[in-house]
Image: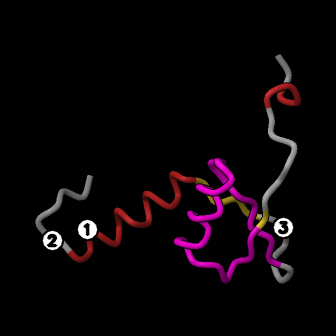
Amino acid sequence: MKVSEAMTTGVVTIGPSHTLREASSVMTERNIGSVVVHDPEADGPGILTERDIVRQYRRALISTTPSLPTT
């Protein structure tokens, strides 16, 4: 099977100034697991995934709750 047979062709983009909450809402509404981040001042596009969002919220939670394990 080729990548072209499995990939999504409709690409959703957001800007770098959007919040993780906004990006998460877009991803939930569109039932997608990632968005392309377009920053006209950057060398190329980026990608934000569900995993990226979960990891950032986990880091924030750990930093505010010292008793949680860090691994």
Instruction: Determine whether, in the image, residue 52 is placed left or right of residue 68.
Output: right
Residue, x 24% and y 58% (percent of image)?
A: 70
Residue 52, label in figure: none
Q: Name the image quarter holding residue 47.
A: bottom right
Amino acid at dot 2: Pro
**Placement of the N terminus among the 4 image quadrants:** top right
Instruction: Determine which residue is flagged by label 1.
Output: 62
Magenta span = 14-39
| Label 1 SS | helix
Query: As rendered, which of 20 and 68 lies closer to the eye?
Result: 20
| Label 3 SS | loop
Q: Name the image quarter holding residue 46.
A: bottom right
Residue 44, label in figure: 3
Query: As rendered, which of 66 and 54 lies closer to the eye?
Result: 54
**In the rendered structure, are the residues bearing label 1 and label 2 in contact, judged by CB atoms less than 8 Å apart?**
yes
User: For the residues carrying marks 3 and 1, which lies nearer the camera in this image?
Assistant: 1
Residue 66, label in figure: 2
Q: Is residue 68 magenta?
A: no
